[in-house]
Structure formats: C-alpha cells, structure tokens
Amino acid sequence: MNHSCTSGSKHLWNVIKNSRYLSDDLKKFVDPVIFRNAFMAHRQNLLPSMLTDERRHIRELAVRRIRKVRGSSSTVKPRRFHVPKLKFRSNLYIDMFDWFKIDVT
C-alpha cells in the first residue's frame, strides 16, 4: 500500500469498488459516508494520481486537462470546495465523476 497523497484517489476508488460487494442494506449506510468523505475524488486531488499513474495514456490525459485549465480565461475568485457527485459504478478511478459536468477554473 502506498501512503503518498498521489495515491489517495486510487485508495478511494478501491473503497468504492469493494463496497459494491456489500448487501443493499449495508450500502444504504456506507454510500453516504463514502460520499461525505470523498475529498480525494475532487479533480484537484485526482490529477496528481493521474500524473503518477503507471499507464502513459492516463498521464497524458492529466497533462491535457491541466493545460486546458491553465488556458481557460476565468476570473480569480475564491472557490468553494465541493465534493463531486460520485459514480459508484465506475470501472477506473479516473471516472469516479463526470469530467464534462464540472466547471473548468
């Protein structure tokens, strides 16, 4: 197990993936707790995991997303940190939320 901050998103995804084997009764209690504590699923925390991924195409995807954000013309205002709506049935940790439904800032 890697305890680096770059592995937090992968660890969260493993928790989500393993929780899918629980009974529906237990999921009713576990899913809200996972959602409330899913800060590592935020794109700012997911990108470092992607940058250090062993797969080259994931690293390149992270670089493209960072360049897109840097190239956007947004005003600099304080942003509220929101935990994204999680997709509990995602097959990869990079798909825990919908990248196309978030504002690029």
Image: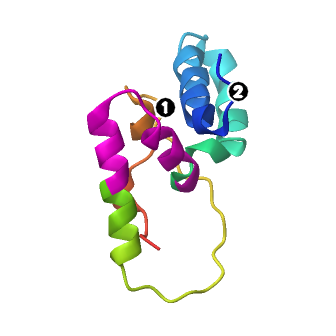
Residue 7, image x and y in percent? 59, 32
Task: Mark 2: give few (<14), some (14-19) or many (20+) Cα within 10 Å.
Answer: few
Residue 26, image x and y in percent? 68, 17
Camera-side mark, 1 or 2: 2
Residue 66, image x and y in percent? 40, 61
Tally of numbered tags: 2
Q: CA distance from mark 1 to mark 2?
A: 23 Å
Question: Going from the N terminus, do you reach mark 1 or mark 2 first?
Answer: 2
Q: Quadrant of residue 82?
A: bottom right
Q: Is residue 96 visible?
A: no
Name which residue type carries label 2. His
Residue position marked by numbered label 1 in the rendering: 88
Q: Quadrant of residue 10?
A: top right
Residue 103, image x and y in percent? 43, 70
Residue position marked by numbered label 2 in the rendering: 3
Task: Mark 1: give few (<14), some (14-19) or many (20+) Cα within 10 Å.
Answer: some
Left or right placement of residue 86 versus residue 3 in this view: left
44 vs 20: above or below: below
SS class, disc 1: loop
Name which residue type carries label 1. Phe
- Asked if residue 56 lies in the magenta stretch, the reply is yes
Residue that appears at 43% across and 32% down = 53
Residue that appears at 59% across and 38% down = 6
Q: Which residues are magenta?
A: 44-63
Is 29 in front, or is 64?
64
